[in-house]
Amino acid sequence: MPVASSILDPDIRAALVAKRLKPRIRQSDALVVHELGLAHARRRVDIAVINGDIHGFEIKSAQDRLDRLPSQLEVYTRSLHRLTLVVAARHVKRVLEIIPPWCGVLKVLAGTRGGIGFESVRRARKNPSVDLYIVAHLLWRNEVQDILSKCGTQPAVLRAPRAELYKLLVQKTPESQLTEMIKTAMAERTFWRDRPLRS
């Protein structure tokens, strides 16, 4: 049996995908992205599941410190529809003191026969403070231009600075459609650091 304090991030990640995310993904057309850069890579979230909304999963093993969590939350709060912290038992109390009420918490457990389990401490809810303009930053400039072009935007407008294109996209697009556009664009990318994985 593993000792909880010796369970590392990669082990938690693999167990999370296998035990918690794959069953959910099999029932939908969700996209799973590891190390997703948010707000033009100001921060990364360990795993993102994109399907209707963007649900981030941030892992904090027993070896991790929580110093960066407040600054991470500043970006996560603007960029993610839902967020679940996947944390070692020693972090649960402190994490609950730091995170806003809409964030979920999964506690990592050392299972039998070398396995890793999870206990739901708090279920993630919809983020009331998500900023669609920041969410739109997940799209590349050419992807935004392509979407706006299909909406009838004039070519001269499409040459505007990227920030203006994001604003225009948010004005023209309902939240649910924006998330679906992001998922579609990511799934179609052929050269991408944040390689998406379907299950």
Image: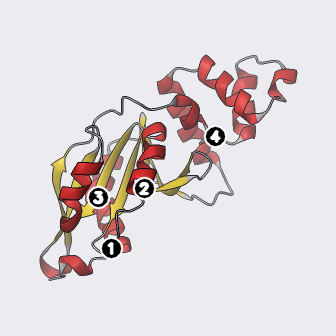
Which of discs 3 and 4 lies nearer the camera? The answer is 3
Q: CA distance from mark 2 to mark 3?
A: 11 Å
Say which label, 2 or 4, has the lower sequence index.
2
Q: Position of residue 192 (x, y in %)?
A: 65, 57
Q: Position of residue 166 (x, y in %)?
A: 66, 30
Say which label, 2 or 1, has the lower sequence index.
1
Say which label, 3 or 4, has the lower sequence index.
3
Say which label, 2 or 3, has the lower sequence index.
2
- Mark number, residue 139: 4
Q: Quadrant of residue 190?
A: bottom right
Q: Secondary structure at mark 3?
A: strand
Residue type at mark 1 is Asp
Residue for badge 3? 86
What is the quadrant of the N terminus in the image? Answer: bottom left
Q: Secondary structure at mark 1?
A: helix
Residue at 30% x, 61% y: name it: 16
Residue type at mark 3 is Val
Is residue 159 visible in the rendered image? The answer is yes
Which of discs 2 and 3 lies nearer the camera? The answer is 3
Q: Secondary structure at mark 4?
A: loop
Q: In the image, is residue 6 above or below residue 84?
A: below
Say which label, 4 or 1, has the lower sequence index.
1
Mark 1, Cα crowd under 10 Å, few <14 / some 14-19 / many 20+, is few
Q: In the image, is residue 32 above or below residue 166?
A: below
129 vs 158, left or right, is left
Residue for badge 2? 47
Say which label, 1 or 3, has the lower sequence index.
1
Residue for badge 1? 11
